[in-house]
Amino acid sequence: MNILVFLDLDEDTKRYILKKLSSYGNVFFKEDVIKNEDILEEMDVLLITSGRRKLTREIISRSRKLKFLQTLSAGVDNLPFEIISESTLIASNSGANAEEVAEYTIGLLLVAAKKIHLNDRSLRRQIWNVHTPRIIKGSNILIWGYGNIGREIAIRLRPFKPNLYGVNRRGVGDDNIDFIYPADNVDSLLPLMDYIILTLPLTKYTRGIVDKKRLSLMKKDATLINVGRGDLIKEGDLYYHLLENPEFTAVIDVWWRYPKKRGEKYEFKYPFYKLDNIIMTPHVAGYWDNFRDKLIKTAIENILRFLKGERPLNIINREDYLND
């Protein structure tokens, strides 16, 4: 097998990867491709981040013999599925940072429930205006997209004693959730919920799944938290809903557009920054010190499953992403 790890890596990480994979085939790194692009023609296995679409497209288009494609990220919505051979097995890194995203989500929920953002903003304006915190105990919380991340969120919410609801494609839950429903039931659940947490992947079925109609089904003082993907929500519909419903709160960590690099001025299509009933963070739920080390190790372990003839985890159904 010819295995390409097309990532920016330090020497210690390269040695770790070589130790894990070299007995199963020839291991190549990004620097090898820079020296000789022709090696792409012979690759059987590829590990790549799915964040840089143009670069990803170039690498995949040259890797015509590819048998297994592993992404470093959990999301695969920006992979060029239309040029990936149907014979290529594709796996995401779903669940690699589930615990960390869940921990951050709990922080976001607490900030919103306890009105910390509003009390902070008042005092920054030198105004003593108490915004009364809400109690989480006994509240109804919906985890929409109950999977790896949703399960970790539920585990961490359990000590607060809310009523935990989950929705996923098959309506299959576990002991960490009180009630679980298939996706078709979501509209009947939304009017009952105090908190709605989006942890869905972005597919052709989930794009724009939260629109004006579904926002109108939610309680006027509900809190909507999105740690999935920005395009799960229709941007304009959310903005006008917040504008017209000041008691409603949105908590957004994932966005519709991203700057090319950190530190750049962020250009909003809608002036969310003028609203008090939104909490905004720059897609950091899945980040922590040395987070990339864990993602790489998890991805390498999944590649090992493939190389050993075992079925890898997190196999992607390309039909969820290809337009009809």
Image (cartoon, rainbow, N blue to C red):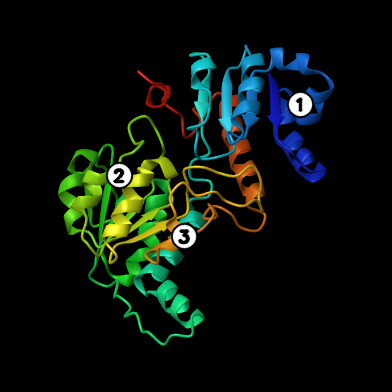
Residue carrying label 2 = 210
Q: Secondary structure at mark 3?
A: helix
- 319 vs 21, left or right, is left
Residue 251, position in %: x, y? Answer: 40, 59
> Quadrant of the rendered structure where residue 230 is?
top left
Residue 118 vertical position relative to residue 75 in the rendered view, above or below: below
Quadrant the N terminus occupies: top right
Label 2 crowd (10 A; few <14 / some 14-19 / many >=20):
some
Foreground mark, 3 or 2, reads 3
Which numbered disc flags the more N-terminal residue, 1 or 2? 1
Residue 102 vertical position relative to residue 310 in the rendered view, above or below: below
Residue 55 vertical position relative to residue 293 in the rendered view, above or below: above
Q: Nearer the viewer, residue 16 or 200?
A: 200
Residue 202, visible in the rendered structure: yes
For residue 273, the mark is: 3
Residue carrying label 1 = 28
Which numbered disc flags the more N-terminal residue, 3 or 2? 2
Residue 257, position in %: x, y? Answer: 51, 42
Q: Amino acid at mark 2?
A: Val
Residue 269, position in %: x, y? Answer: 46, 46
